[in-house]
Image: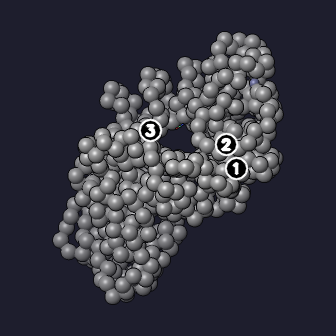
Amino acid sequence: MIPLPEKILYKEGSFVINSKTQIFFDDELEEIVDFFIEFILNSTDKILERTSSKKDKECIIFEIDQTLSQLESEGYLLIVTIDFVRLTATSPHGIFNGLQSLRQLLPPECEKISFNKNTEWKIPCIKIEDKPRFKWRGVMLDVSRHYQEIKTIKHLLDLMGLMKMNVFHWHLTDDQGWRIDIKKYPKLTEKGSKRKDSKIVKHIGKKYRGKPHQGFYTREDILEIVRYAQERFITVIPEIEMPGHATAAIASHPELSCRKEILDVAIKPGIFSNIFCAGQEETFRFLEDVLEEVIFLFPSEIIHIGGDEVPKRRWKECSQCQRRMKNENIDEVQSLHHYFTDRIASFLKSKGIITMGWNEILHNKIDRNVIIHWWKMNKKQVMTHIQEGGNVVVSRFFRYYLDYNYIVTPLKKTYAFEPVPKDLDEKYYTNILGVEATIWTEWIPTIERLEWQVFPRLSAIAETGWSLRERRNYKDFRGRLSRFSKRLDFLGVQYAPLEEVDPSNWYRFWHLRNAFKWPKI
Ligand code: ACM
Ligand code: ZN
């Protein structure tokens, strides 16, 4: 089972699902039960009959029990005996999580629609009491560098649900494409969602793919994804990058930059000096308008505003930015970034939204309600943020960036990573909200490529997010991963071969120069 539950007690015997099996459940669990009935029907051809009276034989029971407070909001208690299966939790989310464990107790073949209808569908007798270590177990998907199809996103959400992950961070804008329809600014998608070409790395004789790339999500698409995620108890957190990584927005609206020059949407990755002008009011009006539409579309209480990799060259030479600094008593351009962040964060706060941003937004006077997304260095400032009451989500790049090659980041390196810093006082542990895998897609144009990069490493991150630190053991995880991978086979996931994800140190050393070479895409 992945992630590993907190407490498991194995018993003798098993519960067999057959045509007499009935299902009893609390009314509020109707949707989850529908999902389970359909799942069983698809794989076994058996229809679980609903019953309104709880039975102690041939019965599967799903119940909410508020007295089980030790399970907190996401935990569950699963008891399987020869006679019955009983899943209890304090909330539907807990039941959903428990159902994922129940699913993993069934043979992997059950993931395949209409597999072998003659197989006996047995669940081993067991008692599991389980809850997550961290409340934030996320995945970030970059859809700017390569637009990702709705079906790819849904597939990812399905797999996240299976591993009890609960945050989908949607990186919607960047230099290489603006991918969210904003009614007030149609040019953002008319121009900003299209680019003329895409760089391909390390291909002899050819540096660019030689064809345009485009795509964006309509309001309907977004509502569809949000709903699909909600059904899997996953919160969708949108990211609108600012003030850097804004070439696609500036290509659509040159007036938002310091030089007002006409640009193309970027066709290669990198860090670009054209960023939003912090001097003019138009920039803030634009961003607030965009954020208002984003708030309307996404039910999340948190919005990610990026804030990473902001070159300040343009701000230094811009008369409007310089005027702003003078008027606001700001003595260096670095602090103009702080002004920018604080202004957007207080706008979002006025709308009841919590701001999140990459760790470059940190400064001494930042509102400690802002959530810091820790991806690189900056440890001192991150620790100060925590000690002053701030919250942090951990995505350290050498461990959790799933676009990296397995030579650079083998599975065991991702698994071994402990997100809570060693020297953090225990009283601050809850300020580490959790972990997030990132899927940057500069070199990920297809679902096959995505699956190869993401699996099996995402399973390691899911386990770190869920399971107790002292229960984590790499050898044991590898054993469970073999079985879990059979499930992925039936789900059609093309993960990287398990014998290739932990290259030896010698192999890594000799191939390090190839580490950033990606296969043909
Ligand atoms: C980042 O990787 N630039 C957050
Ligand atoms: Zn400016």
Q: Residue at x 37, y 37 (%)?
A: 419
Q: Residue at x 32, y 73 (%)?
A: 107
- Report the residue marked by disc 2: 266
- Looking at the image, which is closer to me, 328 or 259? 259
How many residues crowd mark 3 within 10 Å: few (<14), some (14–19), many (20+)? some
Q: Quadrant of residue 272?
A: top right
Instruction: Inspect this view and state whether residue 86 appears.
Output: no
Q: Residue at x 41, y 47 (%)?
A: 405
The correct choice, above or below, for 86 with respect to 367 in the image is: below
Instruction: Report x, y in % for residue 4.
Output: 30, 55
Q: How many marks?
A: 3
Residue 450 located left or right of residue 206:
left
User: Does mark 3's beta carbon lie closer than 8 Å to ligand 1?
Assistant: yes
Residue 354 located left or right of residue 295:
left
- Report the residue marked by disc 3: 397
How many residues crowd mark 1 within 10 Å: few (<14), some (14–19), many (20+)? many
- Looking at the image, which is closer to me, 85 or 169? 169
Instruction: Report x, y in % for residue 30.
Output: 52, 70
SS at circle 2: loop
Could you tell me how far apart the alpha carbons at marks 1 and 3 are, in whole angstroms?
A: 27 Å
The first of marks 2 and 1 along the sequence is 1
Residue 209 located left or right of residue 5:
right
Amino acid identity at mark 3: Phe
Q: Quadrant of the N terminus?
A: bottom left
Whether residues under marks 2 and 1 lie with C-beta atoms below 8 angstroms apart, the answer is yes
Could you tell me how far apart the alpha carbons at marks 2 and 1 are, in whole angstroms?
A: 7 Å
Amino acid identity at mark 2: Ala
Say the numbered circle drawn on residue 336: none
- Front of the two marks 2 and 3: 2
The first of marks 2 and 3 along the sequence is 2
